[in-house]
Every structure is written in structure tokens, then in C-alpha cells.
Amino acid sequence: MSAENYGESVKNLLEASGVEVFDEVLVETSDGVRLKGVLMPRPEVGDPEVLVLKLENGYNIGIHVDRVSSIKSVGRREPAPLVELTLPRGVEKLPKVYFIGTGGTIASRIDYKTGAVYPFFSAEEIYSMVPELEEIAYIRAETLFSIFSEDMTPRHWQKLAERVAEVYRKEAPRGIVVAHGTDTMHYSAAALGFALRSAPGPVVFVGAQRSSDRPSSDSAFNVIGAVVAAIEAPFAESVIAMHGSVSDDVILVHRGVKARKMHTSRRDAFMSINALPLAEVELPSRRFRLLASKYRARRDEVEVKPRFSEKVALLKYYPGMDPSHLEWVIENGYRGVVLEGTGLGHVGSRLHGAVRRAVKEGLIVVMASQCIWGRINMNVYRTGVELLRAGVIPAGDMTPETAYVKLSWVLGQTDDVEEAVKLFEENLSGEYEERSEYRVYPGARWWA
Amino acid sequence: MSAENYGESVKNLLEASGVEVFDEVLVETSDGVRLKGVLMPRPEVGDPEVLVLKLENGYNIGIHVDRVSSIKSVGRREPAPLVELTLPRGVEKLPKVYFIGTGGTIASRIDYKTGAVYPFFSAEEIYSMVPELEEIAYIRAETLFSIFSEDMTPRHWQKLAERVAEVYRKEAPRGIVVAHGTDTMHYSAAALGFALRSAPGPVVFVGAQRSSDRPSSDSAFNVIGAVVAAIEAPFAESVIAMHGSVSDDVILVHRGVKARKMHTSRRDAFMSINALPLAEVELPSRRFRLLASKYRARRDEVEVKPRFSEKVALLKYYPGMDPSHLEWVIENGYRGVVLEGTGLGHVGSRLHGAVRRAVKEGLIVVMASQCIWGRINMNVYRTGVELLRAGVIPAGDMTPETAYVKLSWVLGQTDDVEEAVKLFEENLSGEYEERSEYRVYPGARWWA
């Protein structure tokens, strides 16, 4: 069994010790710990110099090669062959939910035979991972991309939007679920929110903060929540279904254009910003509860406007920022820039000249706030008034990320600056709340 | 009375109607509203084409000039002359608190005679604005800067740190309060957190989300909380004192290096991130309650290391970001860059080449997360491992803003890259929590 995905030091150690992947081994560490387990192939993620051992209790443990003082083979355990999977009986009568895999933690699985990563998004495998679905939905599935979500670009958004529209037209599912890495899921969900103008059902993005082969994985419950939402939602919007707490008690359904990943690792990393979620799915009852009264309803017609401009930049302002950052954007063919300013929508006065020049040269300059919560209001302070006069467009209560996606989409629709500004200022997909909901903020003393 | 600070349309209207500032006027709007009040000078903030009327109930109202169908003078009311202010009797016996004004909403006042803005930070005026202080502290005050906080730069941080050290040495107050605009207050408070290595008392930043002449102003309570903290805190850290709720019931004292402005307009805009606040001050009892067990204590010695490098950039990653943004930073003499990556600390693979080049050319490349909450962990996914190997330094659980300030400070201390990296990786001022406090996050369902 090859150790080829491991790093050089691990390979050398294994060779010197006569140990192969899937051998049962005894490991002794430099700090005197003795462990027995099966040496696993290197997982798709993680440090290549960390040996992964499956202990007898079923848990995996990682040991950095530098800590290993000895490893020896005491037996060999071939992995169980993958079961030939078939579709559960009778599921064809259930509402049809179509999965599109794009990559990320949720959409990948390790083949313990080869160590290779492959997408698990065949319908059969989804049922095998989440048996509850046999009672809920008729799953169909395909893999569109297999990439880490930080590698998503506006081109991927376009392909995904086109494919979603095609699936609704040709496969007529009740809803579509998109498996996506969580890192940039809110950007992609916002993108589909703008691109899909009308649809017979929702596009439900789902991901996992812990990979499926870990006991603490959140993927099964997230998938159940996503499928229930895809079937029961009265809305045909682009949404994100993820844990609402650290327990397995509720999945929140966030409107894509209002959602944001707010924690690096917690299961309930996604929040709705300046809005409440559209809905929630209670677990284990799987009860769907609508929270919003306004939404885009399911319609027979499928309408997609999938183009995005790649000549849009997002620049975060910080004290001491040199105006030449912005000059660089102007000089490099960008058609729009979202400034992530401070407070109500400000950047230092040394940038104002560059802002005026950007507008003069035909760039659309949008102001969003790095506060994340709240609303741009450039009428309060002189700085804001000056920027407004210079032609800066306030992003209202949109997050900087949604403002960026929206500007990319708007500039994908038209080459005319005036028309683009007009389009940007419209509430296209629920991304603007008409009034500031003062209470949709956790408060500074949320912990009390 | 001149209307000189108003915009052109207002000036023309006033001239045509024979109305002067401070006249009692009758205004009729195009939608049929009739209002009586005193025409005020244009405030320092706000749209110059909005007339400000002080109504008989004492409230100010703004009316855009386009809505005014007629305005006429019905009398004249001279503003009350400013009272000659004196220090309240006996305050010299109270603990001494030294105010340093830097600008912002809290530190400015309109002179209704001239319409000019001037800093109110004489001790006498602070007492007149917050009479409760007569029982609490012996206030001394000075104005260091009068700028909007978005115009603060690392040079201002340096001057402020130097002045704070000097005041502790020469004036020996119990504590120092810095009045500061809220937009970038957390950057400045973090800067002082790194620069002031030892002090006899804290530096308490305070600001206002509503200006002092508005009935809803939060400044008086924030100032009370800041002064109480300056006197009673056992710690000698750089902190932020701001409302903990929308009521006037508690002021939170956040560690500067862990604080962030999280709402554009709410009074409780500041949160501690990945940590609880250091303390709180209950209102109206003014009881000081310590929440933290670990802090830097008051020490006789004043030690300040005030230098910051201005050659540090903060770059936020977004899907589709072109590597040439980063190339530009490398080519323009920067010595360090903080990447605000996604999730656990990732940027798209098309940027990895530029990252490697940056490190090769001697830049310090730090990775922070745009999630804001949580902790960088680059050992989980291959992307992170590759970036770590390229020499990227993880920012732990620091916000991107604190990581930026820290890198600026570190590169102000040494020209040696290795030494700078070592210094950056230390926990210098409580900016790293040693372990991830899982619970210090509002949770996705904070509203339930």
C-alpha cells in the first residue's frame, strides 16, 4: 500500500520501518506515549508530515512525524471494500431534490484504498451517508466542480447559475441543493441570488465545518435541513442552510445576499446580517418554520442572468492606507470598486482625490462598512457628504461581500455606467432591507 | 448673522427671503407642513443643503432646502452667551483624570455664535457637560488633535503614545481618558496597547455615536464610564469604554487589542471579539465590576515604544481577486502585509505564487480571517498547509485590524525580519488568547 500522499519524512520513516498504509502498527512517541492502531492514508486535508492512526475506538489521531520515536507493523487489516450502493426502494415517489457538488469539506470523501479524494455526490452515497433522506426525498446528484471554495471565482458563479437554471428546466426538481465549501459560500449564494431572477424552487447551499469522517461532523444534519428547506420552502431564493447552534437542534436558512460566515470553525458559523433568517428547520422533528413574511415565491418560469464582471475590486480601508492602492485599481482597467470604509461610510481624506478621479474615469465606486452590522449613512458627517458629492454610491445595509458580488453582477449586465448605477441602487433580491431593523444585531453584551 | 457654512441653495433661499441665522422663522414645506423655530447655523456635520431648525420643544429638525416652499422671519432670538465656566469647588481632592482630545463626535461642539466647530475639551466644559463628574474626579484636559478618526494614521498613534507617556510622567494622573472618533477607535486603542509597555494607569478611549447636542447622545454616560474605569481599574491597559446596551445601564470596558466596532450607528457598537470585556461599569450606580482575571497591572514605571511602520498593508481577499494586487504591494516598498483571508486562513491558489514571492523578498505576510470570530488554523486544509510552508504567519485569534496594527508596531521596533516575526508571534498585550474560548461568540441564533 503506497504512502504517496504523505510528506517526505513520513515516507522515509515508513520505508525504514517496513510499515505500509493499512498496517496495524505500534507507535511510540518521543514523550513516551504508546499507541496501537491502523495507519491510514494521508487525508485530503492536513499536514502531510502528520501520520494518521485509526485507534481501536474508531477515532483517528494525528501524530507529527517529529514526535515518532518508533513505529512497527504488528499486522495487516485490509479496509472493507466499498459496498455496492443502490438507490433505496420507493424513493422515486418522494419529492425530487437535485444535488450539485462544487467541492469543499462536505462534498469530498477519502477512498481508503487509494488515498485519493473523490466527490461523494452520487445519490446513492448521499443516501448512505444520511439514511434519513430515504423518508424525505428522491435524490439526484451530480458533480459540477471539485474545488476548495477559496478558489471560486465569478466565472464559477456564472457556470453554477447556468447549470441551476438548466437543472430546473430539464429535471424539474422540487428544489436544488448546492454542496459548497463554507469559506466563500456566502459570496456564491449571493451571486446566485442576483443571477437567478425567477425559478420554480430555491437553491439551497449547504456545507460542513467538520469533515464527514469525523464523529463531530455537522454535515448529515446540515444536509437534512437543506433538503427539507428545498422541499418545503415557499420561496424560490438562493439560501444557505447551516447549523443554528452548536447542538443538532436547528438548521437556519439564511438569505444568501444577507448571510456571512462569522466564525472560523463553529458549526453555527453563518449568520444573517441586518436581517433574520428566512426560515428554520427544527431537528429531529424536521419541522420547517417560515420566519420571513417577504420573499420571492416559486414561479414556473426559469429566468437566469448569469454574467458577472471580473473587473471589480474590493478594497478595505485602514488607518494610514495610501491612496495609491486605489490609484492602482483605477489604472488597471477595473470598472468598479467596493470600498470597505469605516463607520457610516468613510475613508481618510487623503483618499478623496483618488475617489473623485475613479468616478471621473468611469468606475463605479460603492461604499460599504467594515462594521458589518448597520447601514451606510453618508449624510451625517462632512466626510460622507463629500464622498457622496464625489459620486460614491452607498451600499445601504448590504455587507461588503454582497456589495462586491452585486457590483460584479450589475457590471455583467450592462456596459453603461448610468444604467449600472441605477441597477445597483435597486433592491434586486432582498439585499436591501427597506428600513434599518435596529434589533437585528446581537448587541455588545450578547453574552450577559 | 452669516449663513456661510450652509450650501449655495440654502444661502440663496435665505437671502431671497431676508432670513438670517438665529431668526425665529416660519417654514412651510412643499408637502404642506408648517414649522416654527429658530434657524440654527449649519452643524459641523451633515448635508449643507439641509436647514436646521430648533423647535420650541428644544429638538432640532433638519429640512432639505428642496422641500422648503417658503421661509419667513417672525422675530429674532440671540443665542444665550456662553457662560464663563469655572472649575467646580473642591474637585482638586478627587482622583485626577487627564483627558486628551483627538477629535470625533464626542470631542467637538458647535459655537452657535459663529457656527464654528471647536473642541470642548477644557476641564471646565467637561464638567459642564457631565455634572456628575464633580463627585467623581479632578479633571484636567487638553486637545492633542482635532481630526475625524478616519484620518488617524500610524503617525498619530505614535504622537498619542508619546503624549500619554509624558502625561503619566509629568501629571501623574490616576488614569488617562482619550476622546476619539469611533470609526477607527479600535485601531488606535490597539496601537496604544502595543506601544505602552508599562504605565501607572489605563488609557481609556471613549467616543460617542450621537453628537452631544442631540437628546439621544450617549456621550455623557460613556464619559462617566470611562472616568470611573480610569480611576478604579486595577489594570494599566489600553481600553475602550462604550455602551454595553441601547439603554443607559452599563458601560463595557473592552481591551483595545480585542475590540472592534461592529455596528455603524448603535450605541453598543463596540464588542470584544474572541474574549469577554475586561470590566463593566454599572449605571447609574457607577459600580465598577472586573470581569477578567488576567491583565497588565498598574506599575510605577512608564515605558513606551511609540514607533510604527507605515509600510504595512492590509489586503482583504475575495473570490476572483487578482494576484497582481499583492504583486503591487511587493513592488511598492512594503515591509509587511496582513491578508484578510477566508475561513481558517485561506486565499485562492492563484495567489500562492505571489505570497511565496512576498516572503522571498523579505515581506512579513500575516494571515487573519474575515470571519472575525474564531482562530486561524492553517493545519486543517491543504491550502493552509501550503501557505504556512510558504512562510505565512498565522494571526491566531486576533482580528485583522489588530493584526495590522501589531505588524505596523513590530516593524517599527526592528528592521530584522526574523526578529520581527519572533516578536509578532509573542503575546505582547493580551491580543492572543492562549486557548480558543469557544463560547465567546454570539452564536448564529443570538436573537432566539
Image (cartoon, coloured by chain):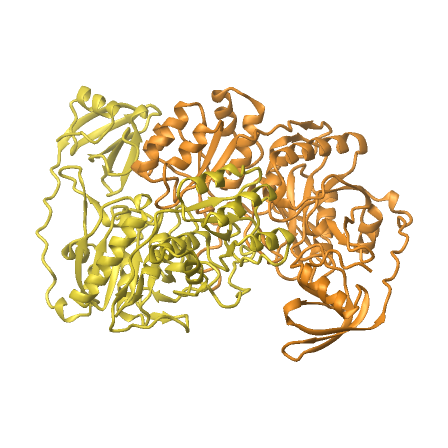
Chain colours: A orange, B yellow
Q: How many marks?
A: 0
**A341, B17: nearer the viewer:** A341
Image quarter where the N terminus of chain B lies is: top left
Outermost residue on the front side: it is A16
Give x and y (percent) for residue B7: 25, 27
Tell me: A232 left or right of B247.
right
Tell me: A296 left or right of B369.
right
Image quarter where the C terminus of chain B lies is: bottom right
**Looking at the image, is B273 positioned above or below residue B105?**
below
Locate residue B285: give its quadrant: bottom left
Which residue: 62% across, 42% down?
Answer: A151
Outermost residue on the bottom side: it is A32
Give x and y (percent) for residue A80: 87, 62
**A311, A432: nearer the viewer:** A311
Determine if residue A135 is in view.
no
Give x and y (percent) for residue A325: 41, 37
**Looking at the image, is A323 positioned above or below residue B298?**
above
**A75, B72: nearer the viewer:** A75
Give x and y (percent) for residue A338: 47, 35
**Looking at the image, is B342 positioned above or below residue B61?**
below
**B173, B112: nearer the viewer:** B173
Determine if residue B32 is in view.
yes
Locate residue A394: give its quadrant: top left
Tell me: A386 left or right of B111.
right
Tell me: A49 left or right of B249.
right
